[in-house]
């Protein structure tokens, strides 16, 4: 069980946000030529500052109660969900300033597991929660359970990066609605970098996780459009850096002429970059999100580009939507059925500013 919120990162981010506009000297290296007419420095700053939005205020909705209790369960203990928790904390703080107490459980297993999520949902049904929120571990297994919970009278929403199956009875979703497109966009960048020719491996993540599977499908469909490109391996690393490293080492052993890797979660770009560095490979890596080690690999040119999701906004909006759902509201004027959060692709020249913005890292 995991109930952890990393306030130190949020504090550092706020401090840097106050001064980041004064930064200079960050050039955006290796950005595709068609990014527009802005200077390289302006392009880098705009990409980074637009990737994560720390400036949020609650809307003017008046909650019906002065206390709310929520239950949130997500796929795996990992820094990505720590970042989501930071946005949750800020929404919680702003509600408290209005005299409204929001408390919540925020828990996940150490290893991604649909079975574990089922157990947590069963426990949540016994609790007195206003809303139960789920980052779906496996859509095939979890979606029918959520439907039954709604039929049984529970107020259920989904959040983070993985929604339930289309047509699910869950009330609303807050998070990434375009995982397939993220996979396609990252892979298009890889294809362009490789002049649309080469051998590619895909590291997916957790079996059945909608976000990971959708990104992999986007990658596969993109590569299928180029006759001189070939997928030579597709492996599931279960969102583990160590497993991603081991799988990449084996892929490189089997395919020493590997040209590129598409990494579909936050862990596998790190594992892949460690392996590529150790093996002395020239394989080009594209991947997801803002892991600190991954950003350093981006800065050093080992990773070509990263698709960074706005986890902070996901967390903030999840709490705000949960309050409205708890009051009996349904999607419509107050909130959409799906609150779409952005993904921004960043490049080598963006890495320094992103490291400082998110981690206060000026090394």
Image (cartoon, rainbow, N blue to C red):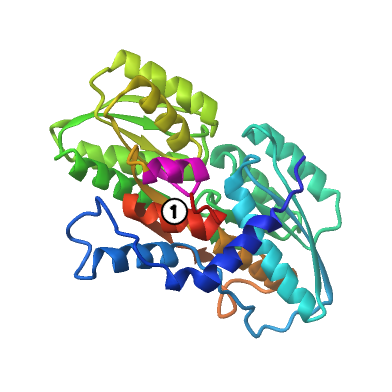
**Residue 23: image location, x then y, percent:** 42, 68
Q: Is residue 259 above or below residue 337?
A: above
**Residue depicted at 60% across the width and 78% down the height:** 334
**Residue depicted at 64% across the width and 33% down the height:** 113
**Residue 79: image location, x then y, percent:** 60, 45
Q: Is residue 17 left or right of residue 189?
A: right
Q: Is residue 15 above or below residue 265?
A: below
From the viewer's side, name the closer residue of 40 and 183: 40
> Mainly helix, strand or loop, the magenta region?
helix
Is 251 one of the magenta-colored residues? no
From the viewer's side, name the closer residue of 199 and 160: 199
Query: Residue 79, can we see it?
Result: yes
Quadrant of the drawing holding the N terminus? top right
Instruction: Say few, some or many: other residues with alpha carbon within 10 Å of mark 1 (under 14 / 14 to 19 / 20 or more).
Output: many
Magenta-highlighted residues: 287-299
Q: Which residue is mark 1?
A: 308
**Residue 215: image location, x then y, percent:** 39, 43
Q: Is residue 107 left or right of residue 20?
A: right
Query: Residue 336, can we see it?
Result: no
**Residue depicted at 28% across the width and 17% down the height:** 255
Q: Which image quadrant is residue 300 in?
A: top left
**Residue 170: image location, x then y, percent:** 62, 57
From the viewer's side, name the closer residue of 47 and 130: 47
């Amino acid at each position: 069980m995991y109930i952890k919120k990393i306030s130190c990162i949020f504090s550092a981010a706020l401090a840097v946000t106050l001064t980041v506009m004064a930064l200079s000297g960050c050039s955006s290296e290796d950005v595709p030529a068609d990014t527009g007419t802005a200077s390289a420095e302006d392009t880098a700053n705009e990409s980074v500052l637009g990737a994560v939005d720390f400036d949020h205020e609650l809307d003017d909705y008046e909650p019906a109660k002065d206390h709310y209790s929520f239950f949130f369960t997500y796929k795996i203990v990992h820094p990505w969900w720590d970042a989501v928790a930071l946005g949750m904390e800020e929404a919680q703080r702003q509600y408290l300033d209005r005299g409204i107490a929001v408390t919540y459980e925020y828990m996940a297993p150490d290893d991604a597991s649909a079975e574990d999520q089922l157990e947590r949902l069963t426990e949540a049904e016994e609790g007195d929660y206003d809303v139960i929120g789920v980052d779906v571990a496996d859509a095939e297994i979890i979606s029918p359970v959520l439907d039954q919970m709604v039929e049984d009278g529970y107020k259920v929403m989904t959040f983070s990066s993985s929604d339930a199956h289309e047509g699910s009875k869950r009330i609303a979703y807050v998070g990434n609605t375009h995982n397939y497109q993220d996979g396609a966009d990252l892979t298009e960048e890889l294809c362009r970098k490789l002049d649309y020719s080469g051998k590619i491996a895909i590291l997916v993540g957790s079996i059945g996780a909608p976000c990971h599977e959708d990104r992999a499908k986007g990658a596969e469909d993109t590569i299928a459009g180029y006759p001189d490109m070939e997928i030579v391996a597709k492996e599931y690393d279960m969102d583990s850096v160590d497993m991603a490293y081991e799988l990449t080492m084996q892929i490189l052993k089997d395919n020493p002429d590997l040209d590129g890797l598409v990494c579909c979660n936050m862990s596998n770009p790190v594992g892949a970059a460690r392996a590529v560095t150790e093996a002395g490979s020239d394989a080009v890596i594209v991947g997801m999100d803002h892991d600190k080690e991954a950003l350093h690999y981006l800065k050093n040119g080992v990773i070509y580009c990263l698709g960074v999701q706005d986890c902070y906004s996901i967390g903030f909006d999840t709490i705000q939507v949960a309050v409205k759902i708890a009051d009996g509201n349904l999607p419509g004027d107050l909130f959409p059925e799906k609150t779409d959060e952005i993904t921004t692709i960043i490049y080598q020249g963006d890495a320094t500013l992103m490291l400082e913005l998110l981690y206060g890292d000026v090394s």
